[in-house]
Amino acid sequence: MDKVQYWGTGRRKRAVARVRLVPGDGTIQINDRTFEEYFPNKTSRLVVQQPLVLTEMSGRFNVICRVQGGGVNGQAGAVRLGIARALVRANADLRPVLRRKGYMTRDPRMKERKKYGLHKARKAPQYSKR
């Protein structure tokens, strides 16, 4: 018999996380490493756990995640969105609660492209009148 599992994809900036929730004891594994090892920063760990803590599902599901691209904060945000989406697939009644806290919203902010004639996206060369 196949094990029940729920999928969710999360994106933030350049980071993409593919999250799988499997009924279990609450361990979180990211890129074949332990949660604490992958996110040594306590803030990132807190961000990742927010949807599980809010819905009181911390000890019910094992989280298995593949994340790539972006930086530490972007990856943490992507994993959070992926977990929230997977939780909604597991139980649709959780959607309003997660939505109210903003965990179901994809953050649209991306890096702006560099324009010609400028050093960066908006940084212009120094202006001199003479």
Image (tube, rainbow, N blue to C red):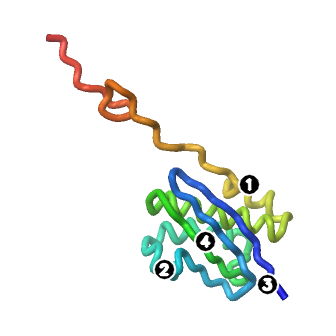
Q: Position of residue 42 (x, y in %)?
A: 47, 72
Crowding at label 4, few (<14), some or many (≥20) Cα neighbours within 10 Å?
some
Disc 3 marks which amino acid?
Lys
Quarter of the image where one finds residue 62: bottom right
**Distance between mark 4 and mark 2 Cα atoms:** 12 Å
Mark 3 highlights which residue?
3
Circle 2 residues within 10 Å: few <14, some 14–19, many ≥20: some
- Give the quadrant of the N terminus: bottom right
Badge 4 or badge 2: first in the primary sequence: 2
Foreground mark, 3 or 2? 3
Label 1 vs label 4: CA separation? Answer: 16 Å
Nearest to the observer: residue 34 or residue 117: 117
SS for dot 1? helix
Quadrant into which the C terminus falls? top left
Q: Which residue is drawn at 45% across and 80% down?
A: 37
- Assign a secondary structure to mark 2: helix
Q: Which residue in the rendered view is the most extreme toward the front?
A: 1
How much space separates mark 4 and mark 3, taking CA atoms?
23 Å
Which residue matches tag 1?
Answer: 100
The local secondary structure at tag 3 comes to: loop
Q: Which amino acid does label 1 sit on?
A: Arg
Q: Residue 36 carries which label?
A: 2
Q: Callout 3 environment at 10 Å: few (<14), some (14 to 19), or many (20+)? A: few
- Residue furthest toward the left? 130
Secondary element type, mark 4? helix
Q: Which of marks 1 and 4 is in front?
A: 4
Q: Which residue shows up at 43% across the image and 75% down it?
A: 40
Task: Name the residue type under label 4.
Answer: Gln
